[in-house]
């Protein structure tokens, strides 16, 4: 009984330690979820002006994508994700960039939430299928990449703030590592954009909503 109690205490201690080490990821994930909830709730308000604007934007976007070649669809998806990453990258190079970094997953969550909720609300079963097979797959993975990128920017901004008066060589090493990691994030985003373009070509006609 005593052995089981010691084992349970160890597991609990390890869990608490892991949570302490990954609190930034947890915070950023919570901000993303908050954005999802706010975006979804905005659709429930039944604002006719918002509905008409979203309907117009969505239809224009789908018509535009349907007329694109595969490479242009890839570029469209990649540039959208890259904008988030570039802003996050720039904020991480600022010693007081943490507030701007924290906003990024919130904005991303709001964008995904309001779009997904509108598609479901406007197109019911077709909308659910469209979200599951066309919209959500790439959005979920790109959101995860953004959260990890925000985590790196969080570390970088905090490190810059704490080392403003220290050796510049250390700062250069930090920046070099930071550049490498964001290069990988952009590479992953390119792969996701390529996958998104392929998924759109395969499923958009099967689960067409307009």
Image (cartoon, rainbow, N blue to C red):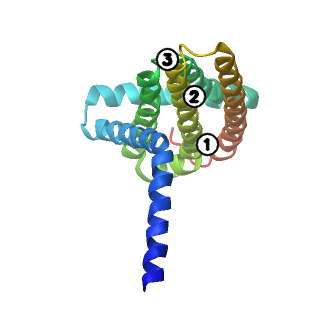
Identify the element where label 2 is drawn: helix
Residue 40 screen position, x and y as percent: 34, 41
Quarter occupied by residue 36: top left
Q: Earlier in the sequence, mark 1 or mark 3?
A: 3
Frontmost residue, 148 versus 121? 148
Q: Residues within 10 Å of mark 2 (few under 14, many from 20)?
A: few
The mark that comes first in sequence, 1 or 2, is 2
Q: Is residue 204 above or below residue 168?
A: below
- Residue at 57%, 38% in the rendered image: 148
Left or right position of 149 against 27: right
Instruction: Check disc 1 and report the residue beneath it.
Output: 204
**Closer to the observer: label 1 or label 3?**
3
Q: CA distance from mark 3 to mark 2?
A: 42 Å
Which mark identifies residue 95?
3
Vertical relation: 203 (above or below) 181:
below
Q: Residues within 10 Å of mark 3 (few under 14, many from 20)?
A: some
Secondary structure of the residue carrying tag 3 is: loop
Above/below status of 90 relative to 111:
above
Distance CA(mark 1)–CA(mark 3): 43 Å
Q: How many marks?
A: 3
- Contact (Cβ within 8 Å) of mark 1 with mark 3: no
- Circle 2 sits on which residue? 63
What residue is drawn where x is 55% and y is 27%?
A: 153
Q: CA distance from mark 1 to mark 2?
A: 11 Å
Could you say where residue 83 lies in the image, as x and y percent from the top left? Answer: 58, 22
Name the residue nearer the viewer: 10 or 194: 10
Furthest residue in direction bottom, as rendered: 1
Where is the N terminus found, in terms of image quarters? bottom left
């Amino acid at each position: 009984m005593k052995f089981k109690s010691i084992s349970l205490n160890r597991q609990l201690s390890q869990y608490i330690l892991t949570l302490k080490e990954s609190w930034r990821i947890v915070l950023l994930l919570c901000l993303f979820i908050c954005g999802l909830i706010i975006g979804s709730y905005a659709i429930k308000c039944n604002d006719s002006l918002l509905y008409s604007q979203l309907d117009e934007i969505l239809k224009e976007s789908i018509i535009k994508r349907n007329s694109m070649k595969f490479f242009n669809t890839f570029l469209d998806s990649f540039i959208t994700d890259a904008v988030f990453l570039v802003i996050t990258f720039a904020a991480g190079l600022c010693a007081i960039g943490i507030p701007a970094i924290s906003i990024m997953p919130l904005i991303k969550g709001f964008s995904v939430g309001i779009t997904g909720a509108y598609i479901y609300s406007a197109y019911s079963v077709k909308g659910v299928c469209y979200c599951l097979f066309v919209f959500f797959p790439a959005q979920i993975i790109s959101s995860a990449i953004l959260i990890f990128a925000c985590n790196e920017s969080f570390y970088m901004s905090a490190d810059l703030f704490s080392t403003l008066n220290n050796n510049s060589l250390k700062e250069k090493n930090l920046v070099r590592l930071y550049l490498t990691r964001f290069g990988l994030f952009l590479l992953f985003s390119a792969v996701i954009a390529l996958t998104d373009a392929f998924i759109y070509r395969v499923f958009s006609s099967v689960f067409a909503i307009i």
